[in-house]
Amino acid sequence: MDIELAPDIQKIVKKVLPHLPFTYINEKRIVCMRSRKSTSRARARIWSFPKIWQLALKIPAHYVIEVLSQHFDKMSDDDKTRVIIHELMHIPKNFSGALVPHRGKHHYRIDNRTVEKLFQAYKNR
């Protein structure tokens, strides 16, 4: 698997964040990467930075959004934005380095309907 920085995805994150209710997300601590030749069926995934690593390395929480080139790059721009919104929804409000599951107890569901609602809010800004 080949991995590289993805400045084009970073631009999508930067463009989307101010228009969505993700005020708790620190854009400077999100790194976007593109991988090639992965065998995963996912279009994108988000990687956490657990507390133990934060303490050991004396670095605050960060997140990595990885897009899988073979699936993500052929999508429309709107669908790419939807995928990025989906991944951003996994970041908890305390920006702790942990991840929110698709069906959290105290959090909204991360599903197509919720993503579409946020996407429409972004488009109609």
Image: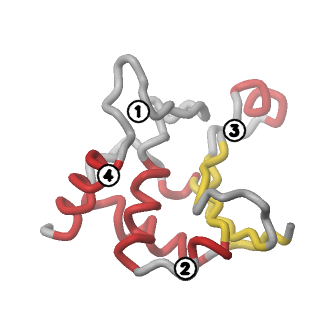
Tell me if mark 3 has few (under 14), some (14-19) or many (20+) residues whose alpha carbon lies within 10 angstroms of its own.
some
Provide residue 73's location: percent of width, then percent of height: 57, 79
In this picture, is 83 found above or below 87? below
The residue under the point 79% across, 32% down is 53
Q: Secondary structure at mark 3?
A: loop
The answer to which of marks 2 and 1 sits earlier in the sequence is: 2
Residue type marked 2 = Asp
Do the numbered discs 2 and 1 sit on residues whose CB atoms are within 8 Å? no
* Circle 4 residue: 115
The answer to which of marks 1 and 3 sits earlier in the sequence is: 3
Between disc 3 and disc 4, the foreground one is 4
The residue under the point 43% across, 52% down is 86
* Circle 1 residue: 93
* Circle 3 residue: 49
Q: Is residue 55 left or right of residue 65?
A: right
Q: CA distance from mark 3 to mark 4?
A: 24 Å
Say which of 66 and 53 sits in front. Answer: 66
Q: Secondary structure at mark 1?
A: loop
Q: CA distance from mark 2 to mark 4?
A: 21 Å
Quadrant of the rendered structure where residue 97 is?
top right
Q: Secondary structure at mark 4?
A: helix
The answer to which of marks 3 and 4 sits earlier in the sequence is: 3
The answer to which of marks 1 and 4 sits earlier in the sequence is: 1
Residue type marked 1 = Lys
Q: CA distance from mark 2 to mark 1?
A: 25 Å
The residue under the point 42% across, 44% down is 89
Furthest toward the left, the residue is 124
* Circle 2 residue: 8
Residue type marked 4 = Val
The answer to which of marks 2 and 4 sits earlier in the sequence is: 2
